[in-house]
Image (tube, grey):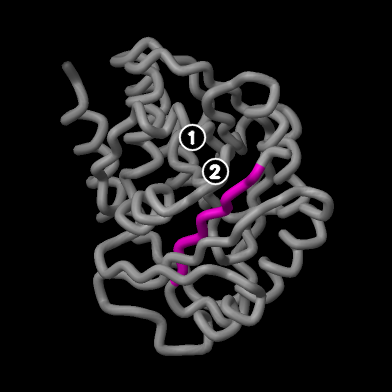
Amino acid sequence: MVTVSIVIPTLNEEANIGSLLSGIKRELKGIRYELLIVDGGPGGHSTDSTVAIAKRHGSKILYDDMGKGSALIKGIKTAKGDIIISMDADLSHEPKELRLLISGIASGYDMCVGSRFLSGGGTSDMPFFRVFGNKVFVAMVNLLYGSRYTDMCYGYRSFSRRALKKLRLTEKGFGIETEINIKAQKAKLKVLEVPSFEKKRRHGEGKLHSFRDGWAILLTVLKNIG
């Protein structure tokens, strides 16, 4: 039976994490899985009840103090599943899409990527300037690396364990999804994009800073050339 590891970076998400984990459990009945919470960021670890709530749901807790990319890499290295899924803690990612991401890998793809810009996908959480910026990064990566992505900076995706070993990820911050897409293309992995709908964060404030993190994404695009 396929084992699934779900890696979720967190920082002060007590109002969201319980509902998210409950939703994951409902969707994955009959599937062997583990929940990996990687808590923390550059400012330290959660100061609310995020970790305590996650523990009550049976999650394994890891700690990180650098950024989203660093947290994902730590979770991926710890994961024991045949299929590894990354998702956000703010309830923007629908647990009901998990089986689609699992099916993509089970059917032979190396990486299955949620896209908000495929037919059937969408978002209620992207102002115009972020949509524009995302499309610019998509166009740059497709032009520079010969890929055909429709979305670039979205964190809801699944991987085979074998494929992740080929990526050698290093990004510490919000450039991690862009690095994954670029390195997957350079490694000639079999990638499937599937429609995904991104909801607005239910509670609290987002961690993304559009211009600062947009600059980090641009640097990620450029430094992987060659």
Q: Which residue is mark 2?
A: 84
Q: Residue furthest front?
A: 1
Residue drawn 66% across the image and 30% down it: 194
Q: Which of the pair 72/210 is nearer the observer?
A: 72
Instruction: Reply above or below: 203 against 208.
Output: below
**Residue 6: x, y in percent?**
57, 53
Dot 2: within a 10 Å radius of its alpha carbon, few (fewer than 14), some, or many (20 or more) residues? many
Q: What number is the disc on residue 134?
A: none
Instruction: Reply above or below: 205 against 72.
Output: below
Quarter of the image where one finds residue 201: bottom right
Q: Which residue is mark 1?
A: 161
**Residue 97: x, y in percent?**
73, 44
Instruction: Reply above or below: 64 against 127.
Output: below
Q: Could you tell whether 180 is left or right of 216 in the image?
A: right
Callout 2 amino acid: Ile
Q: Could you tell whether 34 is left or right of 98 in the image?
A: left
Say if the magenta span includes residue 214. Answer: no
**Residue 157: x, y in percent?**
56, 40
Residue drawn 60% across the image and 26% down it: 193
Quarter of the image where one finds residue 52: bottom right
Quarter of the image where one finds residue 117: top right
**Residue 178: x, y in percent?**
36, 36
> Does label 1 or label 2 sit earlier along the sequence?
2
Say if the magenta span includes residue 9. Answer: yes
- Element class at badge 2: strand
Q: Which of the pair 144/162 is nearer the observer?
A: 162
Q: Are marks 1 and 2 in contact (CB under 8 Å)?
A: yes
Q: What secondary structure predominates along the stretch shown in magenta?
A: strand
Of the 4 image quadrants, the one containing the C terminus is top left
Q: Which residues are magenta?
A: 3-10
